[in-house]
Image (cartoon, rainbow, N blue to C red):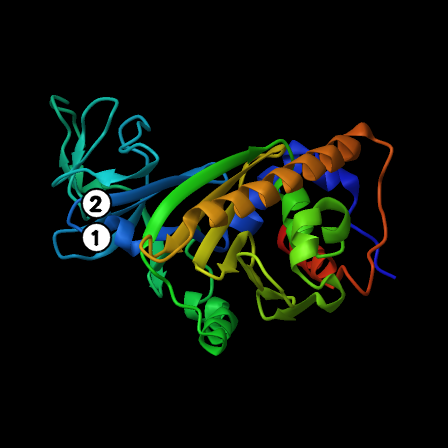
Amino acid sequence: MQLTLPATLYRDPAVFQCERQGVFAAGWQFLGHESEAAAEGDYLAGDIAGWPMLAVRGRDSVLRGFHNVCRHRAGPLVEAGRGSCGGELTCRYHGWRYALDGRLRSAVDFGGAEGFDPRDFGLHPVRLAVWRGFVFVNIDGQAGPLEDLVAPLGRLMDERGVTVGPATLRRSHDLACNWKTYVENYLEGYHIDVVHPGLAAEVDTASYKVRMDGAVAVHEVATSSGVNDGLWAWLWPNLAFNVYRYGLMVEHMQPVGHDRTRLDYLYFYDPETADMDAVLAASDTLTLEDKVICEAVQKNLDAGVYDQGVLSPRHEAGVGWFQNRVAAAIG
């Protein structure tokens, strides 16, 4: 019998601070797709568990990662999302200018200061790696090779013939729950019959299986109709690849704080062949159903009545696997 993690781990701000270091800074985090920053000066930027990140395409066509933080007084360099900064990164607070490789080019109108050497004030770099076009960053620089982490996912995509078309659309959804509450909901199909009646009518829930392969939890289920292809793959610690009949959606489960989560969706489809209306309708329905139940569960976790429960060996092996990894990461 495996008990769940204590409820306090889902509501204590101090726990989230431990997770920022032990889970998110220590691992590989998704930032976007390289096609979204294809030209010189193009960038991707986002907040990862409170760490402001950016990746920018240099004059040499290399994509580099940095903290989105000016070395002067911590001003932001670019807004979150995607865009172009032209030939340099400029602080939006006092206008300090940085080359695309992170070197401080000009401390604008700073004046003479004894001991100040611009070479000592370049942007703080972040380790960056690209896998099949997907851009990842590792904040503490200590994670193992990205290729090792995603190897099971690569095998699965090859076996199932999953191809990645153009990055066509980004959408976000906000949830009033701890990030783990949502992830655990994602990692089991036990709730489908109760929470997702539309999906339950489309899939054979009796055939629903979750298996772990390295850092990947693979969900497979037989489908009869609709847009879902019966394949979902979740990569530690908070990224999912959801396969539809028309393409792929990458789902980044972003903690905004100890009690808030943002789901960032990036859709990969050929707009000339995909039925995007059907895809987005199905996605929105599932997300709303999950939002309602996860927020209700979080409210009960916060109430102080529930401490620990028990996990089903038949349906919740993925949840137990995830909880074990979280416990190990935060000590």
267 vs 281, left or right, is left
> At label 2, which amino acid type do we have?
Asp
Where is residue 301 shown, x and y percent of the image?
Answer: 77, 35
Q: Which residue is mark 1?
A: 38
* Structural crowding at the residue carrying mark 1, measured as other residues with C-alpha within 10 Å and reported as few (<14), some (14–19) or many (≥20): some
Where is residue 194 shown, x and y percent of the image?
Answer: 77, 47
- Identified at 59% across, 42% down, the residue is 285
Where is residue 105 shown, x and y percent of the image?
Answer: 12, 38
Where is residue 216 shown, x and y percent of the image?
Answer: 57, 65
> At label 1, which amino acid type do we have?
Ala
Q: Which residue is mark 2?
A: 42
Residue 104 in sight: yes
Quadrant holding the N terminus: bottom right
Res. 161 image quadrant: bottom left
Res. 170 image quadrant: top left
Q: Secondary structure at mark 2?
A: strand
Q: Secondary structure at mark 1?
A: loop
299, above or below 159, in the image: above
**Residues at circles 1 and 2 in contact by the CB criterion of under 8 Å:** yes
Give the alpha-carbon distance from disc 1 to disc 2, as whole Å: 6 Å
Q: Nearer the viewer, residue 80 or 6?
A: 80
- Identified at 46% across, 53% down, the residue is 250
